[in-house]
Image (cartoon, rainbow, N blue to C red):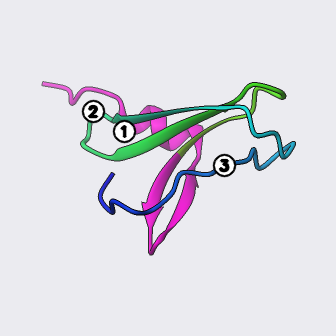
């Protein structure tokens, strides 16, 4: 991610569980995101770094950013 030192979330925002999968990804449009999935409640989020913190992207935004441009 763009700021080395910015820690990934340690706990689920929905249930507070600490067992989470964290996977850095780059979407088709070049957006760097961190996919997080909770092992307890299965909450899933795509996070992006903004202003020194993490912001969740709505799934509609993630899907739009992963589409290939039409030719």
**Magenta span contains residue 31:** no
Circle 1 Cα neighbour tier, 10 Å, few/some/many (<14 / 14–19 / ≥20): some
The answer to whether residue 54 is above or below residue 39 is below
State which region is magenta. 47-71
- Tell which circle, 1 or 3, labels the residue nearer the N-terminal end: 3
Query: Which residue occupies 77% across, 50% down?
Result: 13
Between the C-alphas of marks 2 and 1, the distance is 6 Å
* Residue 19, position as x, y percentages in the image: 73, 32
* Residue 57, position as x, y percentages in the image: 54, 49
* Most foreground residue, 7 or 23: 7
Asked where in the image residue 55 lies, by quadrant, the reply is bottom right
Q: Secondary structure at mark 2?
A: loop
The residue beneath circle 3 is 10
Circle 3 Cα neighbour tier, 10 Å, few/some/many (<14 / 14–19 / ≥20): few
Between the C-alphas of marks 3 and 2, the distance is 26 Å
- 46 on left or right of 3: right
Front disc: 1 or 3? 3
**Residues marked 2 and 1 touching at CB (< 8 Å):** yes
**Residues marked 1 and 3 touching at CB (< 8 Å):** no
Q: Secondary structure at mark 1?
A: helix
- Tell which circle, 3 or 2, labels the residue nearer the N-terminal end: 3
Query: Which residue occupies 33% across, 35% down?
Result: 27
* Residue 8, position as x, y percentages in the image: 54, 51
- Per the rendering, the mark at residue 65 is 1
- Per the rendering, the mark at residue 28 is 2
Q: Secondary structure at mark 3?
A: loop
């Amino acid at each position: 991610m763009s700021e080395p030192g910015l820690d990934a979330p340690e706990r689920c925002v929905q249930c507070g569980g600490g067992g989470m999968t964290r996977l850095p990804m780059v979407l088709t449009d070049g957006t760097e995101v961190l996919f997080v999935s909770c092992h307890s409640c299965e909450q899933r989020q795509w996070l992006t770094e903004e202003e020194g913190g993490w912001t969740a992207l709505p799934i509609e935004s993630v899907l739009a950013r992963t589409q290939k441009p039409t030719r």
